[in-house]
Amino acid sequence: MAKFEKTPGWLDWYAGPAKPRFKLPAGAVDAHCHVFGPGDQFAFAPERKYTPCDASKDQLFALRDHLGFSRNVIVQATCHGADNSAVVDALRAANGKARGIATVKRNITDAELQALHAAGIRGVRFNFVKRLVDFTPKDELMEIAGRIAKLGWHVVIYFEAVDLPELIDFFTSLPTTIVVDHMGRPDVTKPVDGPEFARFVDFMQRHNNVWSKVSCPERLSVSGPPALNGEQNAYQDVIPFAKTLIETFPDRVLWGTDWPHPNLKGHMPDDGLLVDFIPHIAATPELQQKLLAGNPMRLYWPEEA
Ligand SMILES: O=C(O)c1cc(C(=O)O)oc(=O)c1
């Protein structure tokens, strides 16, 4: 199979992460992470917008164990397009400790959807971030949503905060639970109580089928400091945004590492220190339990929750 050359300037995931100081609650779930290839087994998609380093299932499972998580939710990365083989392979190898989110096209058959379900897929991702994917017509997405709703799956959406106004009608017409990636990517240089973030909070307030991942401080932060070199007070500017969502919607928030952190430009965080960020945004054991165990179990392993 083809050898892949990484996108120039690509930052590889951080090897040798710290052991977190924060003790995760029992049964904690890393509810947003990816696998990349390895490219010589699972080719990257021709239509991809970036070519990453490899990040295998075994490396993901080693990180899970090192950080103290019990389970993973593995989200199809855009570099694999709508070929979910790498995620499915990881789910099958995880012995029930992982569930997944796929990307599918309208031509997928019912039998293929059933096979994804059997492997542990529980949702599809609709991506509206223009630097990551080409445009898919909304009628195609709506048709997919209608089909996956019958399987009890949900829709994960990824978009930029500035695009919410034009997308909101589509989002609110989706027939499933909706999970927003990375808090809808707020501009954290704007006030947490300003109109842009208020729009997102209002979206969650009005629609109780909308959940949010309070993930990716390393992607959203402008002030830093980065989670590197033992830093225990990282990403100060992101804290009020994540804290607001966790405290306002304690039963509809999820957390994930986002390992292996596609497309970071400035730095690659130490995932152990990212875990140490959690108590800054979820301040009490009750909030931590919901965020890290209760909520993801209810959504991804309802039969056990
Ligand atoms: O912001 C990103 O670049 C990014 C990309 C992907 C992906 O390529 O799937 O997933 C993420 O969660 C975030």
Image (cartoon, helix red, strand yellow):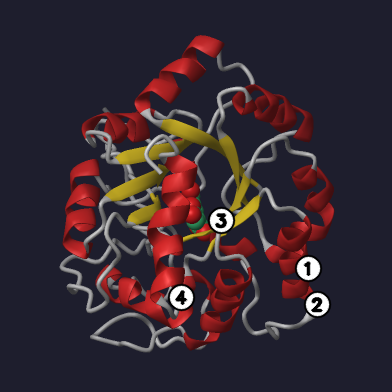
Quadrant where the N terminus sits is: top left
Identify the residue at horizontal 35%, vertical 29% (top origin): 88
Which residue is label 1 attached to? 199
For badge 1, the amino acid type reads Arg
Q: Secondary structure at mark 2?
A: helix
Residue placed most toward the observer, 53 or 34: 34
Q: Earlier in the sequence, mark 4 or mark 3?
A: 3
Report if the CB atoms under discs 2 and 1 are less than 8 Å apart. yes
Q: Residue at x 77, y 35 (%)?
A: 138
Looking at the rendering, which quadrant does residue 104 occupy? Answer: top right
Q: CA distance from mark 4 to mark 3?
A: 18 Å
Mark 1 and mark 3 residues within 8 Å of each other at the beta carbon: no
Image coordinates of residue 293 in percent, x first then y, are 38, 56
The answer to whether residue 224 is above or below residue 210 is below
The disc label shown at residue 282, or none: 4
Q: Is residue 193 left or right of residue 120?
A: right
- Dot 4 or dot 1: first in sequence order is 1
**Callout 1: SS:** helix
Q: Nearer the viewer, mark 4 or mark 1?
A: 4
Residue position for label 2? 195
Q: Who comes first in sequence, dot 3 or dot 2?
A: 3
Q: Decide which of tag 2 and tag 4 comes sooner along the chain.
A: 2
- The residue at label 3 has a CB less than 8 Å from ligand 1: yes
Whether residue 161 is situated above or below residue 22 in the rendered picture: above
List the residue tagged with mark 3. 181
Residue 239 located left or right of residue 233: right
Q: Nearer the viewer, residue 26 or 278?
A: 26
Q: Residue at x 29, y 81 (%)?
A: 228
Residue at image coords 69%, 25%: 146
Residue 233: x %, y % from top left? 37, 89
C-alpha gap between disc 2 and disc 1: 6 Å
How crowded pointer 4 is (Cα within 10 Å; few <14, some 14-19, many 20+) is rated as many
